[in-house]
Image: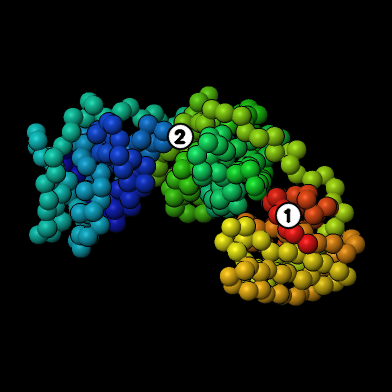
Amino acid sequence: MKATCDRDALREGLAIICGVIPTKSPKPILSNVCLVATDDLVELVGTDQEVSVRFKLDKVDVAEPGPVVIPARTAFDFVRDLSGETVTISTDDSRCTITSGEDSCELVVADPDEFPVVPRFDDQGSVSVQGGSFSRLVGRTAFAAAREPGRYAMHGVLTELDNDQLRLVATDGRRLSMASIPVEMAGAEKTSAIIPTKGMQLFCRVIPDPLDQIRLSLKEGQVGLRSKNAEIFARLIDGDFPQYSAVIPAECGNAIEADAEQFTRKLRLVSNVSGDETRAVRFRVKGEKLELFGHSADRGEATAHMEVAFKGEEAEIAFNADYVLDGLKNGAPERVILEFGQKTSPGKFTLGENHIYIVMPITLDA
């Protein structure tokens, strides 16, 4: 193999590959990247056998087609620090040489036949989505997925295709975020699957232009996404996702509507004194006034007030401030609506069109 390619494109591709490959694995071959040069492109392939990626470099000059398997992180670290505009990759039987200008390195190669087979994207049954819309949808939901051990089905994002809607839902048991966008499902079947959060985040990394159309395919056991220069595959999570519809309050007796920027600022102010364990902030509302109150034994207390539109009777409820701020940051709405009933009932935040965020309340001593 011998090929010359753009340094920045190669660096980008290797960075994405390094986001997939495991730092430690009982299979040493998985710490490598497989580069395959054909007549008009070089393809980079990496996998941890749960998530796989194919990344294409199309501005290349291929002198000798062929594959090579080299240590991914070492290759990325070297290419990252190169100053030349182009990089030449060439191989012999036991070495791969990476050259740019007067700088070069030689890497040990592995047997390409030992590298796992990574599938190719199949358009049949897939749906087309605008890249920017998909990235925003992931951003509004994936942050709420579980991270701690023991909640395997919650470590992913529930993805549903139904009635020309793409809906994503994520929860860690204490909060839940749900958002949707319209899609055309022509040729695609109604389906539901749990996609690993790592796969979702990688999907967004390979969307170069938010105006580009991407294709998403949900098939038995695997999800695939194809963008302009990459194909990503992730093994689906096998498990029972919580019945999220049962958590979303159908009716709430109280509703607060406020400017999201001001609400975020006031909540952040009060949260500065909240205790580290619960991060609790009390919401008290009466008439058109919302009072936010936080305190802790080792920091003190703080109170903030703001004008809101309110429907209901005088009421109060408490939430983990960090959870609420996470929703506001990832939803980025202009207006926020909080609906709640009893102080022990979930709070329902509407953070823009087709974005609902549920946060379980905290019970505080009177």
Tell whether 137 sits left or right of 110.
Answer: right
Give 148 or 92, whichever is nearer the viewer: 148
Return the mark for residue 234. Answer: 2
Q: How many marks?
A: 2
Residue 301 in which image quadrant: bottom right
Instruction: Give the residue displayed 85% in from the left and 65% down from the top.
Output: 310
Instruction: Give the residue displayed 79% in from the left and 45% down from the top.
Output: 249
Q: Quadrant of the N terminus?
A: top left
How many neighbours does mark 1 have within 10 angstroms: few (below 14), some (14-19), or many (20 or more)?
A: some
How many neighbours does mark 2 have within 10 angstroms: few (below 14), some (14-19), or many (20 or more)?
A: many
Give 329 or 76, whichever is nearer the viewer: 329
316 lies above or below 150: below
One can see residue 206 in this view: yes
Amino acid carrying mark 1 in the image = Thr
Amino acid carrying mark 2 in the image = Ala
Residue 8 in the image: state x and y as whole percent. 29, 56
Tell whether 244 sits left or right of 298.
Answer: right
Instruction: Give the residue displayed 66% in from the left and 61% down from the top.
Output: 280
